Amino acid sequence: MKISELARRAGVTTKAVRYYESLGLITPERLSNGYRNYTEDDVRLVREIRTLHRLGIPVERTRPFLECLAAGRPYADDCPASLASYREAIDELTERIEALTVRRATLIDNLNAAAHRGSSVGSPKETGRGSEEYLTLPADLPVPEDDGAADHLPGAKVPRIVLRNTADKAIRLDALGPRRAVIYIYPLTGRPGTDLPEGWNSIPGARGCTPETCGFRDHFQDLLEAGAGRVFGLSSQDTDYQNEVVERLGLPFDMLSDPALSLADGLGLPTFEAGGRRLFKRLTLIVRDGVTEHAFYPIFPPNEHAQQVLTWLRENPL
């Protein structure tokens, strides 16, 4: 067969085939007219090279596997030399993971330091895991009941909704990537000098947005280490309001604003009315690859919810 047919059947480019030839990994026969003639064995070898390369084994180091096939073994990793190549690749990958883990931890520390620099609140390390002013809740808060309003969410596709975050960037909720995104959704955060809706404390699940947010702030690094790729807080409050919250509470993550409650309408999230306004009910979504992997609902007590999410991430590793 010609090189173009080999490339098509093996799922590679003709340039890649020529490169494999230059390394001596495949050696097609030459016809009397000088043209190369590839066989089914060459197709198998090229497919094996492609598979190993996708696993992270450099093309140049696939030779032991190809020689194993050439020796008549049914599998390319049936030979001792192939197993040794696996171990070598694993050792190198382990070293890279360890180096990246150190770099990631440094970046997280830098992020936390930068997020709290100049803040009147200070970082969790400076304030001792949060301020009692924000974490204290009334002892008689009513407990929200599970009304089944979130039962449909696990496995649901996230609609294509674009929201602004507090870094003034457009965030497309269905395109957050393959890593888990934690989106905790809440009615509204109060702030000094701003009155909450009348009867706020008597509405099940309404009170506690600031303590909940402080919990995610204080557990932010733990959440990342447990597998969360991103953390967002989300409410119907506008971006200016959210920016004040980020600054006042010293948050190391961005907040999202959804004044139109478009996510509630697009994904069927539960809402309620208070003070003449429609608001999100408190819940948290774990989103991965545009799908809601898990939903926490109802949430109580809100000041312990970040720890609940952290526990779930640790108990359900990818």
Image (tube, helix red, strand yellow):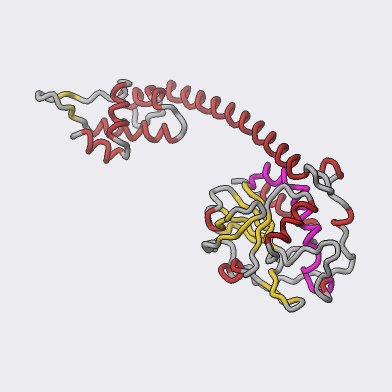
Is residue 84 visible to the viewer in this orientation of the structure? yes
Residue 316 magenta: no
- Tell me: 105 left or right of 40: right
Q: Residue at position x 27%, y 36% from top? A: 7
Q: Main secondary structure of the magenta part?
A: helix
Q: Residue at position x 27%, y 40% from top? A: 9
Task: Name the foreground residue: 276 vs 10.
Answer: 276
Is residue 283 visible to the viewer in this orientation of the structure? no
Residue 195: x, y in percent? 83, 70
Task: Name the foreground residue: 40 vs 181.
Answer: 181
Range drawn in magenta:
201-228
Q: Quadrant of the N terminus?
A: top left
Q: Quadrant of residue 299?
A: bottom right
Q: Residue at position x 80%, y 44% from top? A: 118
Residue 124: x, y in percent? 81, 44
Seen as rendered, the residue at the extreme bottom is: 276
Residue 67: x, y in percent? 34, 22
